[in-house]
Amino acid sequence: MTIKVLLADDQALLRSAFRVLVDSEPDMEVVGEASDGAEAVEIARARGADVVLMDIRMPGTDGLAATRMITEDPQLADVRVVMLTTFEVDEYVVDSLRAGASGFLGKGAEPDELLAAIRIAAAGEALLSPAATKGLIARFLAQGDGSGGEGAYDAARLDALTVREREVLVQVGGGLSNDEIAARLEVSPLTVKTHVNRAMAKLGARDRAQLVVIAYETGLVRAGA
């Protein structure tokens, strides 16, 4: 299966470099380029993109607004967004995750990192830049909207989860992979995947990145814990 990639960045030179890299992979193809967020949303609808590499800062409709437009559109439910940042620590990272992005990556990432990010996002996994620590992301999430970290998501919704699903969600919030969670809880990776999928369905999460957000904003996982 070929992963359809949309490039959204106001720098034409950067888009060209990304296009060459992505099109060189046998399992990927660039289906469009956009110089602002509104154009990215239009192309995503028209060409059926699987993954959007979205610059946060663009003139007109920025990447954050465009990400919200994509994640709130039922017709684009399968589209995954990877935010591109100039700096590894970006003030909009937490807003990007809340808006529904699958994660973020610095523009200075190595080519292999970028390609891996596309594949990870296409698979529905959470992507956190290797240069950004989990603790920093946790602090962003905990402080995000000034409500103390728990006001942005109703903790009572966690009542729908089983005890095991909660345990798995805690591990997901800690950034662990399915294999790592399986080893820690002494179950199979397939069992972990089943629990993750059920938690996503019950909590209305688009992907694993959204589970990470929920884990922190409900207070199930604490910053620095």
Image: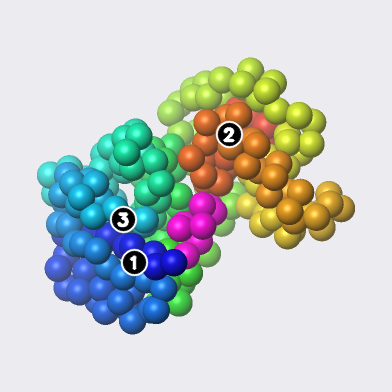
Residue type at numbered disc 3: Ala
Q: Residues within 10 Å of mark 1 (few under 14, many from 20)?
A: some
- Residue 212 percent location from the top left of the image: 57, 42
Q: Quadrant of residue 15?
A: bottom left
The magenta-colored residue range is 119-127
Contact between marks 3 and 2 (CB within 8 A): the answer is: no
Q: Amino acid at mark 2?
A: Ala
Amino acid at the residue labelled 1: Lys
Pick whichever, 152 or 183, lies toward us.
Answer: 183
- For disc 1, the marked residue is 107
The picture places residue 202, in percent across and down from the top left corner, at 60, 29
74 or 203: nearer the viewer? 74
Q: In this image, 185 relative to 40: left or right? A: right
> For the point 76% across and 29% down, which residue is it?
162
Marks 3/2: CA–CA distance: 23 Å
Which of the colour schemes (rainbow, by chain, secondary structure, one colour) is used? rainbow
Is residue 207 positioned above or below 14 on the image? above
Q: Which residue position holds label 3?
A: 49
